[in-house]
Image (cartoon, rainbow, N blue to C red):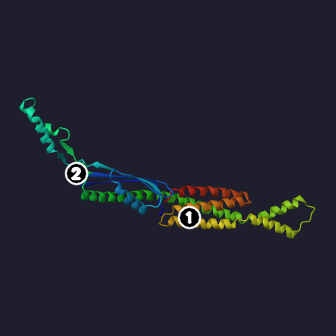
C-alpha cells in the first residue's frame, strides 16, 4: 500500500558563504492533519520574497495537511564575517583629542583603546547583501526548503505505512462482517414468513386464513427485511477501499467520501434488519466503519 499520512516533522540546514562571512540557514517544517493544504510561513524580516515560491513548492509536494514552516539564520562560527573599521571616525576622534594631548591632560591613545570605542569597529550582518549575493543566498534557501519538503514527505510516508497496516486490518474485518451478514441474511426471508404465519395462526386458530393472502403478507414483510442490496453495495465499497489503498495518488478525500457511503449502508442494514444476529453484525460493522472514518482523516 502506498498511502501517506499528514503528520510529520522535518529539518534541513546548510551553510552559505556570503561576502560578509559564513551564514547558516535552518528550515523547520511541522505538518498535522488538515482537510486541505494550508501553509503558514515564519520568515526573517526582509525575506518575504521567499513566500510565493515556498507555497508553490509545498502545493506541488502535498495535497492535504496543515504545515508550519520556519526559516532562521545563525552565523557560522567557523567563518565569521569580517569586521569593518570606521577610519573616518578614528580620525575625528584623534583630532578631537589633539588639544588635550598637547596640554598633557590625556595620555597618547593606543590602538586597542581606539578600536574598543563605540562605533569604531563593526561586524557586518551576513544577511545584509548586495543584489547579486542576495540572489545566490535565496537560491540556496529555495534548495533548502525543497530538501525540507522531501524530508517531510518521507516522514509522512512512514506514517502512511503504519496507517496502511491499520486499514488492511479494518478492510479484512469489514469483509468478514459482510460475509457473516450475507450468510445470516439469506435465511431471514424464510424466518420472517414463518414468524408471520405462526403469529396469525396463534391469534385466531379457529379462523381459516386465505393461503394466498397469507403468502402475500409474508412476502411483503420478507421484502422489507431483505438487505441483499445493502450487502452488495457494502461489498463494492469494501473492494473500492482496497483499490484506493493500493493507488499511488493521494486518497484521503476519496476515503472520506467512501466512509460516508459505508456509514449510510451500515445504518440502512441495521434499520431493515429483522433478525437479532444480523442486527448484532450490523452494529459491529458500524464500529468498523467509524474506525475507517477516523483513520481516513489521517490520510493525505
Which label number is shown at residue 64? none
Q: State the CA–CA distance, disc 1 to disc 2.
A: 55 Å
Residue 38 visible within the image: yes
The residue that disc 1 covers is 241
Q: Position of residue 103 (x, y in %)?
A: 7, 30
Instruction: Name the secondary structure under disc 2.
Output: strand
Count the marks: how many? 2
Q: As drawn, is 196 to the left or to the right of 143?
A: right
Which residue of the protein is positioned furthest toward the top in this rendering? 105
Q: As drawn, is 123 to the left or to the right of 267?
A: left
The reply to whether dot 1 and dot 2 touch (C-beta < 8 Å) is no
Front residue of this view, candidates 259 and 58 = 58
Which residue of the protein is positioned furthest toward the bottom in this rendering? 212
Q: As drawn, is 182 to the left or to the right of 32?
A: right
- Residue 159, placed above or below residue 100: below
Q: Position of residue 3 (x, y in %)?
A: 48, 62
Which label number is shown at residue 21? 2
- For image coordinates 56% across by 55% down, the residue present is 294
Q: Position of residue 212 (x, y in %)?
A: 86, 70
Amino acid at each position: 500500500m502506498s498511502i501517506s499520512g499528514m503528520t510529520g516533522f522535518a529539518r534541513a540546514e546548510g551553510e552559505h558563504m556570503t561576502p560578509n562571512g559564513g551564514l547558516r540557514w535552518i528550515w523547520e517544517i511541522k505538518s498535522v492533519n488538515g482537510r486541505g493544504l494550508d501553509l503558514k510561513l515564519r520568515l526573517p524580516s526582509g525575506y518575504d520574497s521567499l513566500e510565493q515560491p515556498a507555497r508553490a513548492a509545498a502545493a506541488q509536494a502535498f495535497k492535504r495537511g496543515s504545515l508550519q514552516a520556519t526559516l532562521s539564520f545563525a552565523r557560522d562560527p567557523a567563518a565569521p564575517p569580517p569586521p569593518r573599521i570606521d577610519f573616518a571616525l578614528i580620525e575625528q576622534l584623534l583630532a578631537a583629542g589633539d588639544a588635550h594631548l598637547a596640554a598633557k591632560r590625556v595620555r597618547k591613545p593606543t590602538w586597542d583603546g581606539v578600536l574598543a570605542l563605540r562605533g569604531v569597529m563593526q561586524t557586518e550582518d551576513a544577511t545584509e547583501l548586495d543584489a547579486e549575493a542576495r540572489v545566490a543566498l535565496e537560491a540556496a534557501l529555495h534548495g533548502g526548503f525543497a530538501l525540507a519538503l522531501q524530508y517531510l514527505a518521507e516522514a509522512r510516508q512512514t506514517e502512511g505505512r503504519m496507517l496502511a497496516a491499520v486499514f488492511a486490518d479494518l478492510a479484512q474485518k469489514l469483509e468478514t462482517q459482510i460475509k457473516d451478514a450475507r450468510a445470516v441474511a439469506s435465511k431471514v426471508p424464510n424466518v420472517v414468513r414463518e414468524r408471520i404465519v405462526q403469529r396469525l395462526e396463534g391469534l385466531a386458530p379457529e379462523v381459516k386464513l386465505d393461503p394466498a393472502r397469507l403468502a402475500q403478507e409474508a412476502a411483503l414483510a420478507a421484502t422489507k427485511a431483505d438487505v441483499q442490496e445493502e450487502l452488495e453495495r457494502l461489498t463494492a465499497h469494501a473492494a473500492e477501499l482496497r483499490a484506493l489503498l493500493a493507488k499511488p495518488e493521494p486518497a484521503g478525500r476519496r476515503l472520506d467520501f467512501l466512509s460516508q457511503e459505508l456509514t449510510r449502508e451500515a445504518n440502512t442494514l441495521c434499520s431493515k434488519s429483522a433478525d437479532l444476529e444480523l442486527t448484532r453484525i450490523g452494529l459491529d460493522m458500524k464500529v468498523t466503519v467509524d474506525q475507517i472514518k477516523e483513520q481516513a482523516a489521517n490520510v493525505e
